[in-house]
Amino acid sequence: MSVSEVDTPHGPARVHVYPAERPRAALVLGHGAGGGVEAPDLVAARNAAVAEHVSVALVEQPYRVAGRSSPAPARQLDAAFVAIVEHLVTGELRDLPLAVGGRSLGGRVACRTVAATGAVGVLCLAFPLQPPRRSAESRLPELDAVPVPTFVVQGERDPFGIPPPGPRRKVVLVGGDHGLKADLEAVGTAVRGWLHGLLRT
């Protein structure tokens, strides 16, 4: 594993790269709004991907590197993520098919930037479909706009709701809530199965 800083239009980000043995693809994942790359479900997804010979980069957004707990505006998050992916695909993840994704907020960023990153698939862990107590605000359009295969792993008791499946979107429910901590083995198994199918096509 290597850790490096990457310059972005909104300050330095930090990237943790976990190279797989004989990698056949790469997966770049972002963290949730208030958490970091050590979130249990991100770790489970990382381990599952590496076991499938997929190298993984876990991205810390500039606001986290700067020590702030509140996320930056969406356009800043998106621009930083695109800059990080561009850095990775010309460096440590060069010449590998790319999937992107993340936990909660990180999944939203990956959905919004998929055209700019050129990813062949998107992985969303605990997609925050609808903020509790804000019933009019659904983020489903962000998922619906993704033009590549999308895989959502959602806790069956997630207070943010459960996204519906779609023509290019598969949704798998696991035990637990938005933290996805209750059954990490199920999270890892789901991610391995999705990557295996994605890379076979």
Image (tube, rainbow, N blue to C red):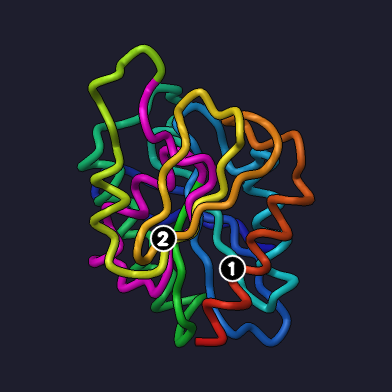
Question: Is residue 93 or residue 31 the one in the foreground?
Answer: 31
Q: With respect to residue 60, does 131 lie above or below? A: above
Counting residues from the start of the chain, the first of labels 2 and 1 encountered is: 2
Q: Is mark 1 on a helix, strand or loop?
A: helix
Residue 39: x and y, percent?
64, 38
Q: Is 83 on the left-hand or right-hand side of 4? A: left
> To which residue does mark 1 refer?
194
Q: Which residue is drawn at 74% across and 51% down?
A: 186
Q: Is residue 124 magenta?
A: yes
Q: With respect to residue 35, does 56 lie above or below? A: below
Indicate the amino acid at tag 1. Trp
Which quarter shows the N terminus?
A: bottom right
Residue 142: mark in rendering: none
Question: Is residue 32 or residue 8 the one in the foreground?
Answer: 32
Dot 1, how many residues are within 10 Å of its Cα: few (below 14), some (14-19), or many (20+)? many
| Outermost residue, left side | 75
Dot 2, how many residues are within 10 Å of its Cα: few (below 14), some (14-19), or many (20+)? many
Residue 31: x and y, percent?
50, 42
Q: Is 175 on the left-hand or right-hand side of 179? A: right
Residue 2: x and y, percent?
64, 62
Q: Mark yes or no: residue 59 visible.
A: no
Residue 92: x and y, percent?
52, 75
